[in-house]
Amino acid sequence: MPEYPPLVKKLMKAYPGKITGYKNDSLVWFDNSKMQFDNGKKNRPYDSLISSPDVEDQFYLPYSTGAILSPKKNEDPGRVRNENFFKKMYGTTKKDVIANCATVMWLKKSLNQKILFSKINGANIQLQKVSDELDLLPDSLKKYLSPLAGTFNWRTIEGTNRLSPHSFGIAIDLSVKHSDYWLWQKTKNGELKYRNKMPLAIVKIFEKHGFIWGGRWYHYDTMHFEYRPEFFAI
């Protein structure tokens, strides 16, 4: 591989066959189309970063695994998403995304529920691996895994006009009853107090197969897991 920027290499390794090169500060896609990687805007306020990022901005923070820690303010690794990047990868319309989805059997042994997930980049295969490992956990942990709050759902993120990663078939929400979400909390002086009930054992299995967890965000969403293998690509 030519000496591309390290972050570009991560994307190419995570999405082989989709991102095929890099030229003149642009990603080169499978169909030879190009997408700007870095618009040159640096040190922007968080609200600007989250609402109008370039592709490079998606890496504004590294994603760390390990113990569950309370994130610092606006520490949201993976929550910054360039919408055009995901449309190019998974589909620009609801119809396109559905055509790129496949069935995953969620908890084959204990629940055997059919759910839709994108087959692009083998995301469905990775989720099936997650499910099969979760099925082996003690019954005491199964309450966190069902009923599911959803997988594919073409919709915007609450309170915004940005498409949710659920729209691209790459996100799954576990049981609402045992989850915490930052918008459910009343803030004091605009500051959030971190909350989480999701066991680390569950989080580790998802991360092992390329999923980031919304519980590692300051704007926490502890039921949320999202297929983002670029954060684990070496």
Image (tube, rainbow, N blue to C red):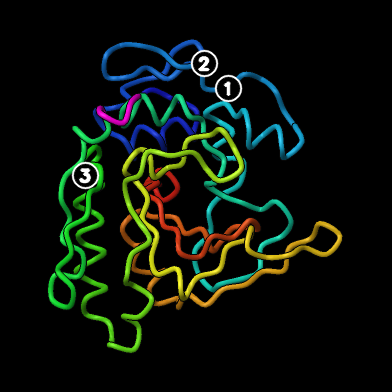
Instruction: Identify which amino acid the numbered label 1 is placed on.
Output: Asp
Q: Position of residue 63 (x, y in %)?
A: 53, 53
State how far apart marks 1 and 2 are (Cα).
Answer: 7 Å
Is 126 colored magenta in this rendering? no
Q: Position of residue 178 (x, y in %)?
A: 47, 75
Which comes sooner in the sequence, label 1 or label 2?
2
Q: Which of marks 1 and 3 is in front?
A: 3
Which residue is at a point 26% across and 64% down the rendered structure image?
130
The mark found on residue 38 in the picture is 1
Q: Is the magenta region chiefly helix, strand or loop? A: helix
Q: Nearer the viewer, residue 189 or 62?
A: 189
User: Which residue has dot 2 on it?
Assistant: 25
The mark found on residue 189 in the picture is none
In the image, the segment drawn in magenta is 92-96
The residue carrying pointer 3 sits among few (fewer than 14), some (14 to 19) or many (20 or more) residues within 10 Å by Cα, namely: some
Which residue is at a point 21% across and 55% down the rendered structure image?
115
State how far apart marks 3 and 2 are (Cα).
Answer: 27 Å
Instruction: Identify which amino acid the numbered label 2 is placed on.
Output: Asp
Which comes sooner in the sequence, label 3 or label 2?
2
Instruction: Identify which amino acid the numbered label 3 is placed on.
Output: Gly
